[in-house]
Image (cartoon, grey):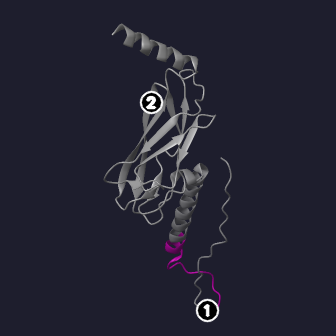
Amino acid sequence: MVRCFVFLLIVRLQLVAQGDPAILQIRMVEGEGTVYPIGARATRGITVQVTDENGKPVGSAAVIFRLPDDGPTGAFSSGMRTEIATTTADGRASIWGMQWNRVTGPLEVRITAAKGQARAGTICGLFLSDAATAEPKSAIAPGWRRHRRILLGVAIAAAAFVSVAAVTNRGTPGPATGSAGVNAPQIGTPTIIIGKP
């Protein structure tokens, strides 16, 4: 029993001496919250960064990505639900090219990192949608959403203006012109300026 304990202590000291971290941490870099269309192949992936207890990147750590067995899920390019990647010198590991199934809803990719005796785990939440135009959220520039709202607001305001102008001019006699004397409302060319607020 004492020999076993001494052996384990020696192995642990050797691992520490080799520079293996005592604690691992996983940080999501890319992919969290991404929406993909069902039945599609992921053109963007999941990237994580593995660091030690001091926040320094850990290279050559094994990172296991695991898709759910049922419900909204898919398969990695290997055809399996599990894929292993190794972190680079900056502590990052990425996986992409998942082929999604045709079940809509949220899915969780379980991610585990290991190096020496240290382990860490996290979950990356994704969503499979049946919307024909679904695309990865991360592919849309954040500023576009703000501009899209501005353009929508301008379009609604223009439609309201046209409606008010049409109601106001309905039945109002215009100046005598020799014909029916009714002026049609005229709207100039709209101008939309998009810039930083």
At horizontal 35% and vertical 48% (from top left) the residue drawn is 68
Label 2 residue SS: strand
Q: Assess whether residue 49 is covered by the magenta stretch.
A: no
Give the residue number, with chain letter if any, for mark 1: 179
Look at the image and give the residue range highlighted in magenta.
Answer: 165-179
At horizontal 34% and vertical 59% (from top left) the residue drawn is 103
**Mark 2 neighbour density, 10 Å: few (under 14) some (14–19) many (20 or more):** some
Q: Assess whether residue 168 is covered by the magenta stretch.
A: yes
* In the image: residue 177, left or right of residue 140: right
Identify the image quadrant of the N terminus: top left
Image vertical order of residue 95 relative to residue 111, above or below: below
Give 141 or 108, whichever is nearer the viewer.
108
Label 1 residue SS: loop
Identity, as a three-letter code, of the amino acid under mark 1: Ser
Give 60 or 5, whichever is nearer the viewer.
5
In this view, the residue farthest toward the bottom is 179
Please report whichever mark, 1 or 2, sits nearer to the chain's N-terminal start.
Answer: 2
Q: Position of residue 5 (x, y in %)?
A: 39, 11
In this view, the residue farthest toward the front is 3
Q: Position of residue 121 (x, y in %)?
A: 43, 33
Q: Position of residue 73 (x, y in %)?
A: 37, 53
Image vertical order of residue 196 relative to residue 180, above or below: above
Give the residue number, with chain letter if any, for mark 2: 120
Q: Quadrant of residue 147?
A: bottom right
Identity, as a three-letter code, of the amino acid under mark 2: Ala
At horizontal 57% and vertical 24% (from top left) the residue drawn is 55
Give the CA separation, mark 1 to mark 2.
Answer: 84 Å
Image vertical order of residue 181 relative to residue 157, above or below: below
Say the numbered circle drawn on residue 138.
Answer: none
* In the image: residue 125, left or right of residue 47: left
C-beta proximity under 8 Å, tags 1 and 2: no
